[in-house]
Image: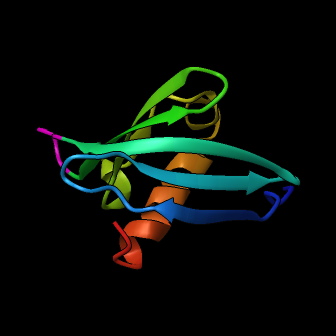
């Protein structure tokens, strides 16, 4: 079984009640920049909307306990995990958001 390449996440600007946050996710030497904000989640966990800058792609991501995590990206549908969930979990776990 192959191992995933290391990923790095940087919180560039924390979200506020009135403004979006900004983060960068680097995988395989390529960095994607995302604006994000927390949104309500009626089914558990914390919900986030992430918009990848430059591509116009928007993902709705839920983080929390393992069974609460979900994302709309291809990586999550194929592998059951993705960089969006892992990145947000790292920021939530370090009380950065």
Q: Residue at x 45, y 58 (%)?
A: 88
Q: Nearer the viewer, residue 61 or 20?
A: 20
Q: Is residue 57 above or below residue 70?
A: above
Res 86 quadrant in image = bottom right
Quarter occupied by the N terminus: bottom right
Q: Residue at x 55, y 29 (%)?
A: 73
Quarter occupied by the C terminus: bottom left
Q: Is residue 79 left or right of residue 97?
A: right
Q: Is residue 16 left or right of residue 62?
A: left
Residue 81 seen by the camera: no
Q: Nearer the viewer, residue 68 or 33?
A: 33
Q: Give the main secondary structure, helix, strand or loop, of the magenta stretch.
A: loop
> Farthest bottom residue?
94
> Farthest left residue?
42
Q: Give how far across and how far down residue 24 sits, in percent.
A: 63, 54
Q: Give how far across and how far down residue 49 sits, in percent.
A: 37, 36
Was residue 42 drawn as part of the magenta stretch in this picture?
yes
Q: Is residue 82 above or below residue 6?
A: above
Q: Residue at x 59, y 46 (%)?
A: 82
Q: Give how far across and how far down residue 16 sits, in percent.
A: 26, 56
By what rule are the colours in the image chosen?
Answer: rainbow
Q: Is residue 49 above or below residue 92?
A: above
Q: Residue at x 49, y 51 (%)?
A: 22
> Farthest front residue?
18
Residues drawn in magenta: 40-44
Was residue 20 drawn as part of the magenta stretch in this picture?
no
Q: Give how far across and how far down residue 54 sits, in percent.
A: 66, 26
Residue 74 seen by the camera: yes
């Amino acid at each position: 079984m192959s191992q995933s390449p290391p990923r790095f996440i940087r919180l560039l600007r924390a979200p506020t009640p009135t403004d979006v946050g900004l983060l960068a996710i680097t995988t395989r030497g390529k960095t994607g920049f995302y604006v994000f904000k927390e949104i309500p989640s009626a089914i558990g966990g914390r919900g986030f909307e992430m918009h990848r800058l430059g591509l116009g792609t928007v993902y709705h991501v839920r983080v929390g306990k393992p069974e609460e995590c979900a994302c709309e990206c291809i990586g999550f549908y194929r592998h059951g995990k993705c960089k969006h969930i892992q990145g947000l979990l790292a920021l939530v776990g370090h009380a950065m958001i």
